[in-house]
Image (cartoon, grey):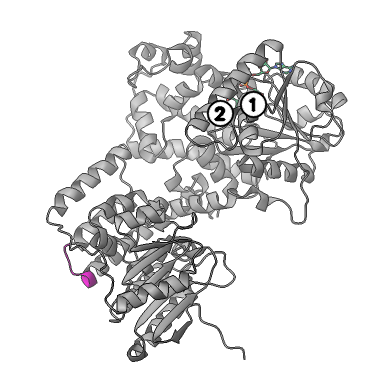
């Protein structure tokens, strides 16, 4: 039988043990079950050989990753409730044993050294890192609803003092120079040097006492007030919302720093188990997985499919959306773009794009010069030969089916038969529009969100005639312009607006039952939305919401919206008047426009949240049942990146599972 090789094998040469760890078959090293077991065995084995070992170096076998930390799948596995406890207990025990070997230990870091990976390094005598741009060091766990539970909340403050608190709360990861400055690592070496050779030199210096490590005994006597200040700062940033990860990590640091390390680790473990059990941690981790999945749209393309090269793109319409889409094509793809609109729309469109690109350049966020990118735009007002060699056309003219039909007929006479065509329509059925396109298999919806260069989401809509190659090619386009795709079948409102409008219906029903505007909005910002639904209406444009209700969805708009639009209040940004005043308070002038009920209802905040959350779940269920999307992840991605659904809830489908609502309503989970 073949002998299993350890993930943490070591070799001893001249009294130095070099542990070269590598979780084989994975892109990065994480604390898998096997890695945890092997690490423990390695430590035990090193303990036995203590007498012949003078120093130990830990170095990764992967070319550009030291260690990425915990394996989030282990922590969230619902079938393994003991999993988290096992992981934390093993990490604590074996890091502690390593720390107490009585032999100098050194982490030789190249590439990401994060979370449980940096906690491994923290339990060593010293840390050195290369200056590679890929070397990043820190404890990002609070960003995924957890906190560092492998000793990080105890060892980092003991190493660098109070500065650790902010780093942990913000989940910051730092380049090597900054990490060195803060004392998180002890030495930086050039990437071009042989890291192992440099590590051996360093460990010999440690053994021979030739190097004085910067170690301060930090004074934590004013810890109570520092923790209190940190708590207030967090609450200010979250506008009063308690995040379990931040609340519990502060408790862990607060109580732990008052105890000796071994006791402190037990305190950390207790709070970590609490945080890992919160639905917010599981929701945040779901969002992390959604992000990882949609970060690489190319990975969603059917296996073996060769996408069509997109060497030249055309844009129809140089309005709000046309301009935004061109900005992203230019900055991400640097390919020529033909844009067609009326002559009077050309100048303002070009000026706008230049201004936005210049703003990006000023912040150092633009590849290529503003001039060279703007030179790629070819504006036209006629169907010129410029369209003949275009690979993809995106249409964003007025939302008028007759106009779009006419535009497609002319377009199809001008472009090649294999040119892909996508419409940015927000409400006209893609299948209807396709009737005006010759070879309709090449046609689909590509629904962007405004402002395009800031919104990451793109809905790719499959009409009845759309062929799979077209969807695959659009996924390739998403990858090129760095958009997060949600692929769906044709449906009123697609995914995002299909959820958003029932949420608005419920909002105005509640408002008209007598609940104050502030109370409704605060219920949802308290849940984690960046803005409440009434402020969202105001910001999008109350007339736009009215238009979608009446024209796109063919429904009656809520009476309040009718009245407010009729009174010429289209939203504060748009017409200076809407629901709110400049200072953010409700405009008293709008109140008489809300139909009043004789006996206003007095709902609790939780009742309001439940009522306003329900439409998301009901629509999501319908989208899945009707096969509009096949995976609850598509709905959650749409809600998080299209509507601002709170990331720590993991999306409406995941949140319904986590809170038990899915089982209560439908007898099973969505995931
Ligand atoms: P817009 O009114 O800002 O721009 C439309 C542009 O189309 C105008 O510049 C107009 O001159 C031009 N146009 C009209 N007829 C044309 C023709 N025959 N050939 C070429 N250009 C022509 O409208 P916006 O907001 O950019 O919307 C465009 C499309 O995008 C619509 O289908 C809309 O539903 C959709 N959409 C809009 C969103 C938004 O937030 N504004 C979000 C997502 C989709």
- Report the disc number at residue 374: 1
Q: Is 70 drawn above or below residue 586 in the view shown?
A: below
Say left or right for 496 vs 598. right
Say left or right for 256 vs 364. left
Q: Residue at x 46, y 13 (%)?
A: 564
Between the residue at mark 2 and the residue at mark 1, the CA separation in whole angstroms equals: 9 Å
- Report the disc number at residue 327: none
> Considering the numbered disc 2 on the image, is that residue within a helix, a strand or a loop?
helix
Q: Which residues are magenta?
A: 258-263
Give residue 31's position: percent from left, percent from top: 46, 69
Assign ligand 1 to one image quadrant.
top right
Does any portion of residue 94 appear in the rendered image?
no
Of 199 and 382, nearer the camera is 199
Does any portion of residue 525 appear in the rendered image?
yes
Of 443 and 660, nearer the camera is 443
Q: Which residue is mark 2?
A: 357
Give residue 533's position: percent from left, percent from top: 44, 29
Say left or right for 196 vs 274. right
Instruction: Judge whether residue 408 is colored magenta.
Output: no
Quadrant into which the C terminus falls? bottom right
Q: Is 433 drawn above or below residue 123 in the view shown?
A: above
Instruction: Judge whether residue 260 is colored magenta.
Output: yes
């Amino acid at each position: 039988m073949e002998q299993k090789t350890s993930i943490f094998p070591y070799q001893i040469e001249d009294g130095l043990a070099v542990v070269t760890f590598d979780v084989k078959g994975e892109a990065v090293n994480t604390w898998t079950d096997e890695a945890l077991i092997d690490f423990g065995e390695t430590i035990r084995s090193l303990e036995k050989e203590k007498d012949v070992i003078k120093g130990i170096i830990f170095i990764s076998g992967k070319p550009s990753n030291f260690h990425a930390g915990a394996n989030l799948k282990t922590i969230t596995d619902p079938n393994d409730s003991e999993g988290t406890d096992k992981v934390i207990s093993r990490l604590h025990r074996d890091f502690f044993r390593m720390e107490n070997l009585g032999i100098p230990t050194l982490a030789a870091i190249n590439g990401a050294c994060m979370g449980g990976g940096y906690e491994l390094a923290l339990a060593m005598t010293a840390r050195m890192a290369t200056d590679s741009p890929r070397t990043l060091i820190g404890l990002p766990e609070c960003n995924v609803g957890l906190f560092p539970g492998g000793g990080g909340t105890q060892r980092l403050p003991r190493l660098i003092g109070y500065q650790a608190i902010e780093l942990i709360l913000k989940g910051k990861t730092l380049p090597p120079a900054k990490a060195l400055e803060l004392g998180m690592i002890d030495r930086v070496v050039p990437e071009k040097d042989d890291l192992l050779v440099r590590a051996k030199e360093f460990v010999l210096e440690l053994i021979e006492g030739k190097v004085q490590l910067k170690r301060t005994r930090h004074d934590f006597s004013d810890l109570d007030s520092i923790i209190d200040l940190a708590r207030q700062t967090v609450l200010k940033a979250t506008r009063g919302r308690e995040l379990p990860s931040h609340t519990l990590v502060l408790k862990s640091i607060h109580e732990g720093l008052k105890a000796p390390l071994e006791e402190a680790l037990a305190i950390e473990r207790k709070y970590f188990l609490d945080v890992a059990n919160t639905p917010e941690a599981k929701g945040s981790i779901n969002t992390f997985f959604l992000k990882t999945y949609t970060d690489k749209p190319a990975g969603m393309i059917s296996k073996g499919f060769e996408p069509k090269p997109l060497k030249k793109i055309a844009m129809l319409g140089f309005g709000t959306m046309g301009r935004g889409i061109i900005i992203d094509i230019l900055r991400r793809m640097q390919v020529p773009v033909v844009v067609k609109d009326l002559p009077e729309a050309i100048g303002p469109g070009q000026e706008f794009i230049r201004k936005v690109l210049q703003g990006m350049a000023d912040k150092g966020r633009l590849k290529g010069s503003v001039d060279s990118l703007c030179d790629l735009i070819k504006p036209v007002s006629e169907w010129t030969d410029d369209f003949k060699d275009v690979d993809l056309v995106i249409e964003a003219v007025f939302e008028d089916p007759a106009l779009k039909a006419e535009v497609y007929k002319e377009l199809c006479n001008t472009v090649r038969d294999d040119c892909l065509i996508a419409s940015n329509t927000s409400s006209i059925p893609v299948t209807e529009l396709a009737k005006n396109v010759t070879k309709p298999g090449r046609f689909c919806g590509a629904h962007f969100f405004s402002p395009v260069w800031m919104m990451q989401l793109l809905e790719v809509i499959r009409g009845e005639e759309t062929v799979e190659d077209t969807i695959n090619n659009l996924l390739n386009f998403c990858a090129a312009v760095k958009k997060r795709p949600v692929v769906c079948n044709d449906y009123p409102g697609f995914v995002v607006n299909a959820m958003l409008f029932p949420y608005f219906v419920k909002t105005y029903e509640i408002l008209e039952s007598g609940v104050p505007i502030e109370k409704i909005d605060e219920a949802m910002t308290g849940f984690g939305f960046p803005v409440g639904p009434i402020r969202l209406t105001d910001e999008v444009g109350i007339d736009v919401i009215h238009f979608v209700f009446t024209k796109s969805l063919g429904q009656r708009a809520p009476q309040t919206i009718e009245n407010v639009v009729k009174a010429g209040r289209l939203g504060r940004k748009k017409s200076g008047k809407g629901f709110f005043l400049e200072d953010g308070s409700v405009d008293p002038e709008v109140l008489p426009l809300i139909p009043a009920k004789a006996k206003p209802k007095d709902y609790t905040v939780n009742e309001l949240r439940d009522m306003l959350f329900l439409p998301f779940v009901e629509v999501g269920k319908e989208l899945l049942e009707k096969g509009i999307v096949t995976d609850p992840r598509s709905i959650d991605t749409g809600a998080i990146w299209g509507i601002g659904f709170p990331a720590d809830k993991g999306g409406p489908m995941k949140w319904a599972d986590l809170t038990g609502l899915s089982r209560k309503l439908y007898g099973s989970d969505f995931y």
